[in-house]
Image (spheres, rainbow, N blue to C red):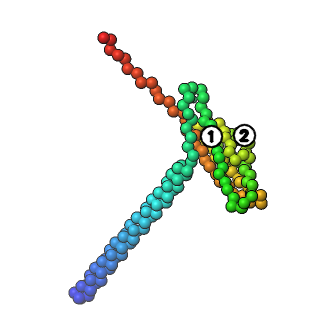
Amino acid sequence: MNNINGYIILIIGFGFLFTARGLEQRAKYEEMDKKKRIRTERLAFDLRRQAELDLELAKCKIRIPHDGNSDTNTAKVVLTAKASDNDKGDELSYEWSQTSGANVNLKPKPNEKEVFFNAVKGEYTFEVIVKDNYNDIGTETITVKVLPELNNSPDVEIQCPV
Ligand SMILES: [Ca+2]
Ligand SMILES: [Ca+2]
């Protein structure tokens, strides 16, 4: 009888041991999964952040010049397309178009190699399509970020009467 009780206690003991081991193992795996998930999320966040930084760095930044007049708030932005074609004798034509930002007029005409516009603070994106004699094209885009005019406040001090 004592032997049987002993066996039963032993079996229950082993049962507890295995269950505890199993639970411990499961908790360990769950912890590993959690860490892996956090690492993956952090990596995805870093990649997104880096992509945003790259986009920001790729923007062409122009500051509205200080001209001593708070009523004027535009900058002249000149866009020049640099294109070449390896086929000797091919002539290139240009076509600029705006793809985002407050609408601006490209002067003198959107089909010039170089165009300009007057811009207030904001972001503007343009595309240029360059075509050769065979109607084959090359395209490029640019985002221009126009930054506000800077102004320093006056410095002042009052002198003590002598
Ligand atoms: Ca001004
Ligand atoms: Ca060509």
Q: Secondary structure at mark 2?
A: loop
Q: Nearer the viewer, residue 70 or 88?
A: 88
Q: Residue at x 43, y 66 (%)?
A: 36
**Kind of residue at badge 2:** Pro
Q: Residue at x 60, y 44 (%)?
A: 144
Q: Secondary structure at mark 1?
A: strand
Quadrant location of the N terminus? Answer: bottom left
Q: Note whether residue 108 is visible.
A: yes
Q: Note whether residue 97 is visible.
A: no
Residue at image mark 2: 108
- Earlier-in-chain disc, 1 versus 2: 1
Residue 70: x and y in percent read: 56, 26
Q: Residue at x 70, y 53 (%)?
A: 129
Q: Residue at x 32, y 74 (%)?
A: 20
**Kind of residue at badge 1:** Val
Residue at image mark 1: 77
Left or right of 38? Residue 138 is right
